[in-house]
Image (spheres, rainbow, N blue to C red):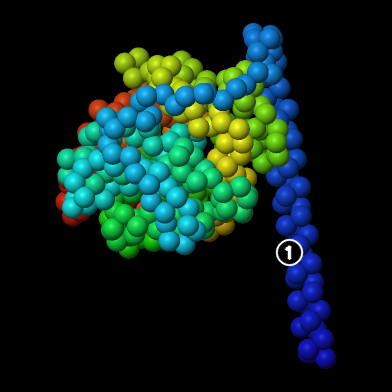
């Protein structure tokens, strides 16, 4: 009797889990459709403003000079151990110096770290990598190739493949999400963590549930869950909805002296504009709901969080929410008059704060708790 009862309970539990899983994805795709509807006014404005180029897009034929030059460091490739993926990177500084690994976000590549490559080559082996699916790095085609566990394995393999066992880990946007999570799971491989305009995943989960305004700002995450449609929408008007967040006076870089010129903008558009190249970066988002945290994730390494005050995608009010998850020295800095693209927007201020954090003895840093 006990055996049959146990089997019955197990069957009921499995059924409940399957039903809850189905309901979860129904909610996600319902939100995705609602998100698509919310963007209709934006696309209608594009139709009115550029009616003859709305359905036009073409890959950039030649890579801009700044993307290929060795001004900011030497270009290299590394094939990592577990996946066999070949990664492109740009490195500056002496090979015998401690490693600083720089992880970019969407829709960027190594070039977003040009100012940090220039600044930290003195004292660090500074390496800005193109994440898998971006830039010149390999872009495997399957959705499952972009699961969080796979991306974290990439980071581990890159550190080891570059000849190190630990690093100063720096991340922005999606790279920041990877940096947070890697520091939780592989704390022994991170000496210090620096994150820019990327919330700790658990803190974001807490914050967005209580702040509908942030949920609305993040609605593109739901839009990106849909197949094919996001690739089409982002390509329209010659990639207007990729170009605009980088260059728009409200969304893009705020510092007039650092605004992207055409060549610099093309540095971020070149690879993404190629046939089929948008899908791999979007697959990061399409795996995000399989990763969403359900419990606290404690960071145990000294951490610096930098945040552009005028981020149009992530509210600065969530910054204090991070503190509860940091069980180590923790510093935050809100950079005034800076956008989401903070390391490009205010590079001198960002680099100065980073340098001060890196030079400060651990005992002198302020603890989060």
Q: Nearest the camera: 94 or 364?
A: 94
| SS at circle 1 | helix
Q: Most extreme residue toward the bottom, as rendered? A: 1
Give the residue drawn at x 45%, y 33%: 108
Tell me the quadrant of the picture where the N terminus can be found: bottom right
Give the residue drawn at x 24%, y 46%: 125
Residue 259 in view, yes or no: yes
Location of residue 330 in the rendering, given as x and y in whole percent from the top left corner: 30, 48
Location of residue 214 in the rendering, given as x and y in whole percent from the top left corner: 56, 34
Side of 26 relative to 304 (left or right) = right
Side of 320 relative to 144 (left or right) = left
Q: Nearest the camera: 139 or 6?
A: 139
Side of 237 relative to 173 (left or right) = right
Give the residue drawn at x 67%, y 16%: 54
Q: Nearest the camera: 319 or 196?
A: 196
Query: Which residue is label 1 attached to?
Result: 17
Location of residue 52 in the rendering, given as x and y in whole percent from the top left corner: 68, 9
Give the residue drawn at x 41%, y 24%: 64
Image quadrant where residue 264 sits: top left
Location of residue 72 in the rendering, given as x and y in whole percent from the top left corner: 28, 33
Tell me the quadrant of the picture where the C terminus can be found: bottom left
Q: Is residue 45 above or below residue 225?
A: above
């Amino acid at each position: 009797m006990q055996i049959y009862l146990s089997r019955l309970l197990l069957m009921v539990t499995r059924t409940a889990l399957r039903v809850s899983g189905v309901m979860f994805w129904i909610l996600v795709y319902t939100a995705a459709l609602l998100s698509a509807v919310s963007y209709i006014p934006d696309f209608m404005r594009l139709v009115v403003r550029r009616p003859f180029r709305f359905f036009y897009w073409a890959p950039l034929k030649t890579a801009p000079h700044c993307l290929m030059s060795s001004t900011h460091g030497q270009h290299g490739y590394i094939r990592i151990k577990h996946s066999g993926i070949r990664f492109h990177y740009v490195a500056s500084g002496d090979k015998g110096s401690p490693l600083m690994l720089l992880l970019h976000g969407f829709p960027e590549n190594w070039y977003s770290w040009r100012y940090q490559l220039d600044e930290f080559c003195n004292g660090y082996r500074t390496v800005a990598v193109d994440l898998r699916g971006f830039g010149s790095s390999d872009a495997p085609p399957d959705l499952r190739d972009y699961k969080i566990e796979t991306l974290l394995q990439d980071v581990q393999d890159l550190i080891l493949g570059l000849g190190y066992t630990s690093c100063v880990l720096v991340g922005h946007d999606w790279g920041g999400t990877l940096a947070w999570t890697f520091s939780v799971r592989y704390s022994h491989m991170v000496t210090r963590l620096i994150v820019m305009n990327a919330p700790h995943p658990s803190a974001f989960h807490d914050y967005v549930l209580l702040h509908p305004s942030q949920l609305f700002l993040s609605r593109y995450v739901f839009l990106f869950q849909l197949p094919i449609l996001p690739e089409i929408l982002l390509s329209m008007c010659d990639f207007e909805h990729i170009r605009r967040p980088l260059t728009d006076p409200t969304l893009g870089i705020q510092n007039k002296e650092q605004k992207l010129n055409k060549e610099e903008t093309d540095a971020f558009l070149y690879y993404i504009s190629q046939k089929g190249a948008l899908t791999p970066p979007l697959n990061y988002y399409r795996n995000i709901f399989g990763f969403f945290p359900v419990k606290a994730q404690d960071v145990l390494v000294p951490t610096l969080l930098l945040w552009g005050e005028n981020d149009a995608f992530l509210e600065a009010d969530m910054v204090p929410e991070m503190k509860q998850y940091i069980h180590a020295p923790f510093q935050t800095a809100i950079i005034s008059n800076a956008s989401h693209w903070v390391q490009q927007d205010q590079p001198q201020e960002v680099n100065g704060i980073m340098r001060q954090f890196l030079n400060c003895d651990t005992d002198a840093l302020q603890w989060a708790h």
